Amino acid sequence: MKKRHLYPLLFATLFISAAMSLMVGDVTVGIYAALEWLGDRLGGSATEEGAFYKILFEQIRGPRIVLAAMTGFVLGLAGAVVQGLFRNPLAEPGLLGASNGAALGAVMVIYSGLATTLSFAVPLAAALMALLSVLILLALAGRGASSLRLILAGFAVSAFAGAGIALALNLSPNYFAALEIAFWLLGAVENRSWLHVALAAPGAVLGCLLMWRAARALDGLSLGEEVARSLGINMVRLRLQISIGLALAVGAVVSVTGVIGFVGLLAPHLIRPLTGALPSKTLLPAALLGAILLVLADSFVRAIPTPTELKLGVVTAFLGVPLLLALLTRPGASLLNEQ
């Protein structure tokens, strides 16, 4: 598929997915009612039914759809960037420890009780801890670290953060605090407001810009590190730029949604047959596909009638594993040999 056709298709799919998501939930809204609400909004009228839909669409479903799209965009972009950086198709955004670091920061705030007094304490602590974890990672790996050393340092940071989360659960002062931590770690966009979107947006935008600016350098890196250096690419600066961008973007969204897996791993693979293996042509399509996947997953969560709403991270894991197995076993296209 040509690039000029792919982008309109992805944007249109994202728009349609978001529009459909507005109508799905405990209160199912028909297309005519949605159009009537839109007409009321454009015409400035305020009927009683229109006031109900205004609250439903603009204050309840609107923020979670925007947040789901933003989170999917960040994870899809981060997945494509990390796979390009390490030239490893099995790499994913949590590889550098940002996701677990952000989760640890949030858990610490929930455990201490600050989350009940400061609404922005969890997002702020998660974003700062994600940035701190990446800075520790870079210090552990060293200035001239190879990709393998960076991966091993990332694994160490992730393992330490995971141990900290487990310790907080183990020492939780009461059952309800442990339950709140566990539910947050499952990942969700329910009960999120425009405040959460505003808290996540600055770090997400800045981090995505830093990762996007590395696109051309990743094209050179796809030919190997020695070739990249011969083209004038500063590998130390490239890794630092991507690491900070990843920490800011992933830390920002994880700080308000919890940990949501598989999107960053799968989105680049699903889009790559349409874009080719060149990183610069994969980044934005993978980000848009990630946004589509999470919006659809959130719609699925709200469409399934369950006593307790399913967590988004649980759904992406259940849907992601079969897709990953299908990609691994498809004939003549092993993931391990794609790049």
Image (cartoon, helix red, strand yellow):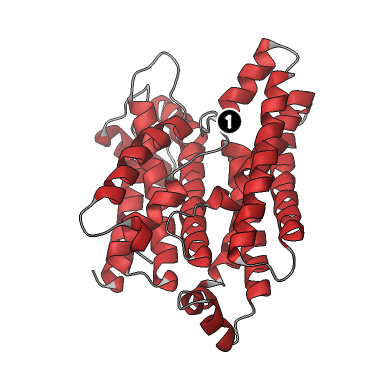
Q: Is residue 156 left or right of residue 188?
A: right
Taking the view exactly as shown, the residue that stands out farthest to the left is 331
| Residue position marked by numbered label 1 in the rendering | 185
Residue at the spot x=72%, y=33% of the render? Answer: 164
Q: Quadrant of the C terminus?
A: bottom left
Residue at the spot x=68%, y=33% of the render? Answer: 163
Location of residue 56 by image quarter: top left
Q: Is residue 246 left or right of residue 276?
A: right
Q: Is residue 96 visible?
A: yes
Location of residue 36 by image quarter: top left
- Asked if residue 32 is positioned above or below residue 288 in the image, the reply reads above
Could you tell me which secondary element the residue under label 1 belongs to? helix
Residue 313 horizontal/vertical position (percent): 47, 34
Front position in the image: 54 or 4: 4
Front position in the image: 28 or 223: 223
The type of residue carrying mark 1 is Leu
Mark 1: few/some/many CA within 10 Å (<14, 14-19, 20+) = many
Residue at the spot x=70%, y=71% of the render? Answer: 144
Residue 121 horizontal/vertical position (percent): 75, 35
Residue 8 horizontal/vertical position (percent): 31, 64
